[in-house]
């Protein structure tokens, strides 16, 4: 079974998301959009769909990536078959957080690693 296929995104928790986004924009040139983040496209991936890329986002405690967690960041990994992978991870004794969540952006699932780091798994929409 294929597991992780790439990075989907990196999400930072911030005390002042607006100020931190502005810092990254001004000092590092990150093209921060109105939704609070940026998309870094995958130019070398010939099979990518329009708009595909790695998401980079800064949010506060109300950011969906941090729901139910006190972690300072979440790394999102792309996967090919989220439901199958979550089932295998459960069988392997991993700390899977609930079932797959379906959204307009695809399927999302969560697992916690042995040190308590929240990992978000993402299956892009077809």
Image (spheres, helix red, strand yellow):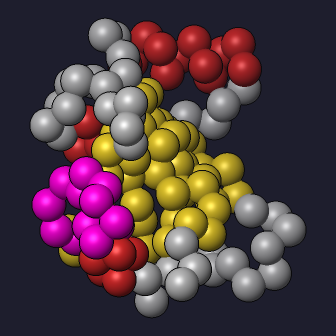
Q: Quadrant of residue 12?
A: top left
Q: Which residue corresponds to the image point at 36% horizontal and 17% vertical from the top-left? A: 14
Q: Which residue lies furthest to the front in this view?
A: 92
Answer left or right for 99 relative to 36. left
- Residue 38 counted in the magenta span: no
**Residue 86 image offset from top left, x and y in percent:** 31, 71
User: Does the image show residue 64?
Assistant: yes
93 part of magenta stretch: yes
Q: Extreme bottom residue here?
A: 126
From the viewer's perspective, is residue 1 above or below residue 36? below
* Residue name at image x 23 percent, y 24 percent: 70
Residue reaching furthest to the right: 44
Q: In the image, residue 106 lies at what x, y percent?
A: 35, 74
Q: Which residue is drawn at the image coordinates 25% and 51% (left, top)?
A: 95
In terms of depth relative to the viewer, which is nearer, 114 or 125?
114
- The tally of labels here is 0
The residues colored magenta run 89-100
């Amino acid at each position: 079974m294929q597991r992780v296929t790439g990075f989907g995104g990196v999400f930072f928790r911030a005390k002042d998301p607006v100020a931190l986004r502005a810092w990254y924009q001004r000092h590092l040139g990150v093209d921060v959009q109105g939704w609070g983040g940026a998309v870094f496209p995958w130019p070398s991936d010939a099979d990518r769909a329009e708009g595909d890329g790695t998401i980079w986002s800064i949010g506060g405690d109300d950011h969906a990536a941090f729901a139910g967690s006190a972690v300072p960041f979440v790394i999102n990994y792309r996967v090919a078959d989220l439901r199958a992978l979550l089932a295998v991870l459960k069988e392997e004794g991993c700390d899977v957080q609930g079932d797959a969540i379906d959204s307009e952006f695809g399927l999302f699932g969560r697992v916690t690693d042995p040190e308590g780091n929240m990992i978000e798994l993402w299956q892009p929409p077809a």
